[in-house]
Amino acid sequence: MKKSNSYIPLSYKLFISYLLMVMTPVIVIGSFAYVSSVNSSEQHTRSNLEIAVKQIGNNVDYRLADVIRGSEDIYADQPLSGILSGYYLDYEKYTITSQYILPKIESAANLPNIDVKLSVYLSNTNISEFYYLDRVVNPGDSLQYSIFHLDRISNSKWYKDMNEYMNYETIEWKQIDSDATNARISLLRPIINYHTLSPIGLMNFNVKLQDVFYDVDFTKLGKDSLLFVVDGNNHLLYTSSRSDSKLLPFAQGSSVNQPEGYMQIKQPISNMNASIIAWIPNSSFQENSQKVRNITILICLASLLVLTLISWTISRYFSKRILKLIRSLKTFKEGNFQKRMPVQGKDEFSQIGEAFNDMASNMEKLIDEVYLSKLEKKDVELQVLHSQMNPHFLYNTFSSISRMAQLGEIEKMHEMVRELAKFYRLSLNKGEMIISIEKELQIIQSYVDIQRIKFADRVIVNYEVCEETLKYETVKFILQPFVENILEHAWYDDEIHVVIRLFFEGDEICMEVQDNGIGMKEELIEQILTLSEKGVGYGIRNVDQRIKLQFGKAYGVSITSSVGEGTTVRIRFPKFNR
């Protein structure tokens, strides 16, 4: 049977399975949330509209209560009732009317924010009639109040109908005479004789519908909403004006019926036998539902995106741990037996990692047993090379001292002997191969001081040292061979300039020895850094091998040079402290 060549990575398989697991609840929960949110939004919108209509009704009741309180000033005034029931001579009528009756009526008609036409009808013909046109009206004064005899309205149909059931408790809002035409309404209330509790007259507080229904404004409920007032017979009493509306196909006073496509909210008016009705188009709820739908879809998409990222992260997490094992096995296959798997957590992956690391350690141990003797032999060889450096330098220095003695330069000879003693006191270091960078710098400074005595002022050395590098450690005696090599092979003129630098480069420490000597060709640099039998650059290669042996093959010595311009040697090793 032929095997399929298609390869699907484990991370993709995990991702697809996780994605299916998260999509199902997101879709189910999102659908449920959408239906619930739409219902909740509609209920919330209806509740807000009901509150708005109720507030409008409260404001209307407040304005109606102002008119009723004005009527109460006349209705509850028992002394005024007695005066209106009494008999007066002609000379008394004017005084009674001007000093008591008219001030009371004027005070009752003086209502805030409402233009009132107050008419008082009396059955007592002994009280003279008074017309508001008879008084001098000040500019801007809108108070209108009159006193009439009751026989003026006794034949009116509305009065006859009302007189059949009127008693001392009667109070009624009603459109009479031309009120409907003039968009006004009247508060009708009897004036009572408190001795007999029988009506002795009638007061009519006639007000504009606009004044009492000022707050009935459709704009408070939203676009295309209708807001109006109907009386107890469901006849239109007042409607909120809107110039562009054609949704009220009925005239004032006719019966109203709810049209299709609208929701109705009805709020009774406490101080009048009427109700406020609001018609809200269902399309406004649909707009809210669309907003809720869009928000729900957006949230679901965002949740799906986040969960997708989480699924991808989790699948990558597990697949990475497996890939680490695969990469480690591949490195073993390529011959790198130092590779180890990082072990994290306490699960099956950590057990696999521990087993792999144990296997790697056992294999590396077996390999070490084979090559250990060769490595030890190489280390001994490097120790010998290091030990050979000091005798070579000592031999050259003694030659210089001998020459100074022959020439009679006793003072310079004494100074060189002192510096030589200082040099060996610093470099011996109890036989340790690792010293601080600060001590290595002191050793090279001591060496340079000896060479300055030998070459007088022909050797100029500058130091550029980052003080932070001095607290770390390095292999001993790695700068001196390069300075010595410069003084032996790099002379180009009577003077030679040398710069010694110590600085950081990332997590590494760099030492540079730069001169302005004759320089070297690339072929010579390659011979110095390459193991060969020609014996070229033995001391420099010694330093490079000791650094690699101590810190690893990634570190060591590099040389850049230009013929006639000079040479720069760079020594790299990591930050190190025992």
Image: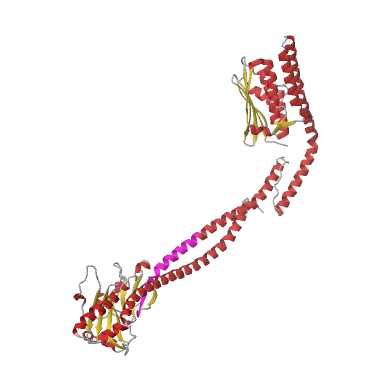
Side of 45 relative to 192 (left or right): right
Q: Quadrant of residue 407?
A: top right
Name which residue lies at 20% across and 86% down.
Answer: 89
Side of 549 relative to 227 (left or right): right
**Which stretch is magenta?**
272-298
Residue 282 counted in the magenta span: yes
Magenta region, main secondary structure: helix
Which quadrant does the C terminus fall into? top right
**Residue 63 place in picture, x, y as percent:** 34, 73
Name which residue lies at 48% across and 69% down.
Answer: 40
Side of 219 relative to 333 (left or right): left
Q: Is residue 484 visible?
A: no
Q: Quadrant of residue 408?
A: top right
For the image, the number of numbered tags is 0
Single out the residue that lies furthest toward the top: 407
Name which residue lies at 39% across and 76% down.
Answer: 267
Q: Nearer the viewer, residue 470 or 311?
A: 470
Q: Is residue 289 visible?
A: yes
Residue 129 counted in the magenta span: no
**Residue 189 place in picture, x, y as percent:** 30, 82
**Residue 369 place in picture, x, y as percent:** 80, 38
Q: Nearer the viewer, residue 258 or 452?
A: 452
